[in-house]
Amino acid sequence: MNHRSGFQPLKDTYTKQLIALRDEKDQFLAAYFPDYGSRRTQVEKLLISYTRMLEGLIERPSHEWGDIVLIGCGVTVTYMDDGMSESFTIVFPEEAQPDINRISFYSPIAEQLLMRSCGDLVSMNTSMDTYQVRIDRIWYGEDGTEEARRAAP
């Protein structure tokens, strides 16, 4: 399989995602954050940063696509304090199922992983705790078997 052609569906998916997020940002914010406040502003900034990053990513060569945490991808992290690993799939809010680790992109955990790369150490700040994780694997698709995936060295 031509490596480039394997990424075309991925590029198409994220081009559609970019258009939807850019065109429907105000409707999304109104639906999930009807009250203006700091959390809505924070998520709006996240959406702006994410769409700008997607714009640049779509223009990049296909071989650079597999190592960035995006909405729709899976990510495995290792907790640095105990060495335990956990995997999440980062999804849109309507697809979230926290009991099976499908978390909304604006959840405290996903928000801090979004736009990061394999091998990154991330200080996670939640309302309950602060801890550090390392991103060990990023994949696209439900089972992680797609060609477009990377693991930390």
Image: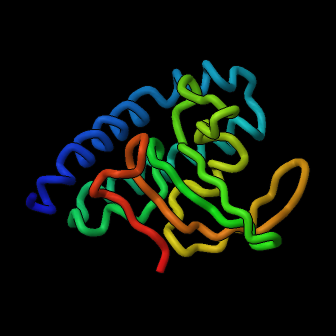
Q: Residue furthest right?
A: 128
Quarter holding the N terminus is bottom left
Residue drawn 47% across and 44% down? 71
Q: Is residue 8 left or right of residue 57?
A: left
Q: What is the total number of numbered labels drawn onto the structure image?
A: 0
Residue 135 location, x and y as percent?
58, 67
Residue under the image location 50 percent in, 63 percent down: 137
Viewed as shown, does residue 1 lie left or right of 130?
left
Q: Compared with residue 54, is residue 153 higher up or lower down, i.e. above or below?
A: below
Above or below — where is 9 with respect to 95? below
On the image, the x and y values in percent for residue 145 come to 35, 51
Q: Quadrant of residue 121?
A: bottom right
Q: Nearer the viewer, residue 34 or 71?
A: 71
At which x and y percent is residue 97?
A: 63, 29
Would residue 10 be found to the left or right of residue 141 on screen?
A: left
Residues 125 and 84: in front is 84
**How was the colour assigned to the protein in this rendering?**
rainbow
Residue 38 x/y as whole percent: 77, 40
- In the visual, does 137 lie left or right of 17? right
Q: Residue at x 68, y 45 (%)?
A: 42
Q: Residue furthest left?
A: 2
The residue depicted at 54 percent of the width and 43 percent of the height is 90
Residue sitting nearer the eye, 129 or 35: 129
